């Protein structure tokens, strides 16, 4: 199969201008979470099937970072803190293989 080469066209920089107003940025960084972090109250849990504690480790780490707050001195404190526990789906009331708990 023969490959055809595409000719690259260099960009032409016209200049810096203030003539066009900047539009409002409506994009949201990254995808929305699959987990309802704001709806989870202290002591409650989210039941997850077909996952393990190890598979959710990065999700929990990112959530704990997202809900941490720095004070004026630069110390980091947790506004919300989550942890996971592996479950037996046969014994769990919701059939979950892992649960995410909120402790703070």
Image: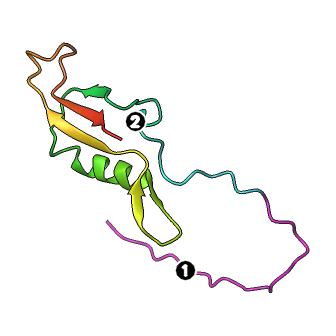
Q: Residues within 10 Å of mark 2 (few under 14, many from 20)?
A: few
Indicate the quadrant containing the N terminus: top left, top right, bottom left or bottom right.
bottom left
Q: In the image, which disc is placed on residue 25?
A: none
Mark toward the start of the polypeptide (1 vs 2): 1
Q: Residue at x 32, y 26 (%)?
A: 44
Looking at the image, residue 56 sits to the left or right of residue 18; the answer is: left
Image height check: is 34 above or below 69?
above
Q: Does residue 66 sit above or below 21 in this rendering?
A: above
Magenta residues (range): 1-23
Q: Is residue 90 above or below residue 87?
A: above
Q: Quadrant of the C terminus?
A: top left
Near-viewer residue (80 or 38): 80
The x and y percentages for residue 32 are: 48, 42
Residue 18 picture location, percent across and down: 88, 77
Q: Which numbered circle lies on residue 34?
A: 2
> Looking at the picture, how far across and down is residue 40, in whole percent?
40, 30
Where is residue 20? Give x, y as percent: 87, 69
Q: Is residue 94 magenta?
A: no
């Amino acid at each position: 199969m023969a490959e055809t080469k595409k000719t690259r066209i260099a960009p032409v920089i016209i200049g810096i201008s203030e003539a066009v107003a900047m539009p409002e940025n409506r994009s949201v960084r990254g995808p929305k979470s699959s987990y309802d972090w704001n709806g989870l109250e202290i002591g409650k849990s989210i039941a997850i099937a077909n996952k393990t504690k190890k598979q959710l480790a990065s999700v929990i780490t990112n959530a704990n970072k997202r809900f941490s707050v720095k004070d004026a001195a630069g110390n980091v404190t947790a506004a919300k803190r989550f942890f996971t526990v592996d479950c037996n789906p046969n014994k769990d009331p919701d059939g979950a293989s892992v649960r995410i708990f909120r402790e703070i």
